[in-house]
Image: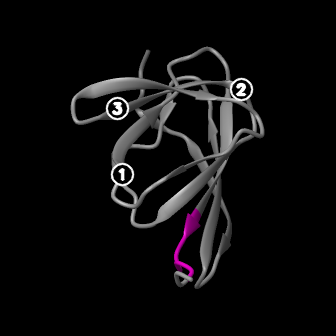
């Protein structure tokens, strides 16, 4: 399966606090390799499995609608949909960290 086509990214909000992007992965699409600048939360919209390519390894990432997860800034990877179904999620990047306390 070719992964030359980039997944569809629609930025919904981009202000001084957060960037909210809806990602839609048709079969055979990918994000392209990238490094996350901010901590972020992913909210799956569909079920499915995306493949995460990082440091020469590939790991499955199972999406369950409504089951959110977080990742830290600095994550470097390429996310690829190698399945036959569309996968989608909303990514919320946290530009400002709340003060501790």
Q: Earlier in the sequence, mark 3 or mark 2?
A: 2
Which colour style is shown? Answer: one colour
Left or right: 21 with respect to 67?
left
Q: Nearer the viewer, mark 3 or mark 1?
A: 1
Q: Mark 3–mark 2 contact, CB under 8 Å?
A: no
Compared to residue 20, the image places residue 78 above or below, namely above
Q: Is residue 8 magenta?
A: no
Q: Residue at x 61, y 73 (%)?
A: 18
Distance from disc 3 to disc 1, alpha carbons, whole Å, reads: 11 Å
Left or right: 96 with respect to 63?
left
Q: Number of numbered discs present?
A: 3
Q: Which mark is residue 93?
A: none
Q: Earlier in the sequence, mark 3 or mark 1?
A: 3
Of 71 and 27, the residue lying toward us: 71
Left or right: 89 with respect to 100?
right
User: The C terminus appears in which quarter of the rendering?
Assistant: bottom right
| Residue 56 location (% of width, % of height) | 22, 29
Among all residues in the image, which is located at the extreme front?
101
Residue extent of the magenta highlight:
93-98
Of 26 and 88, the residue lying toward us: 88
Task: Locate residue 35: give its quadrant.
Answer: bottom left
| Residue 98 location (% of width, % of height) | 57, 80
Q: Which residue corresponds to mark 3?
A: 53
Q: Which mark is residue 75?
A: 1
Distance from disc 2 to disc 1, alpha carbons, whole Å, reads: 22 Å
Q: Which mark is residue 47?
A: 2
Q: Residue at x 40, y 61 (%)?
A: 73
Task: Locate residue 79: give its quadrant.
Answer: top left
């Amino acid at each position: 399966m070719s992964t030359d086509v980039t997944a569809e990214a629609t930025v919904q909000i981009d202000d001084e606090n957060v960037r909210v992007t809806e990602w839609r992965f048709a079969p055979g699409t990918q994000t392209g390799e990238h490094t996350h600048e901010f901590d972020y939360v992913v909210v799956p919209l569909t079920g499915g499995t995306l493949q995460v390519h990082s440091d020469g390894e590939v790991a499955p990432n199972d999406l369950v609608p409504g089951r959110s997860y977080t990742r830290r800034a600095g994550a470097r990877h390429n996310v690829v949909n190698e399945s036959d179904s569309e996968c989608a999620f909303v990514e919320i990047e946290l530009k400002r960290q709340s003060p501790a306390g």
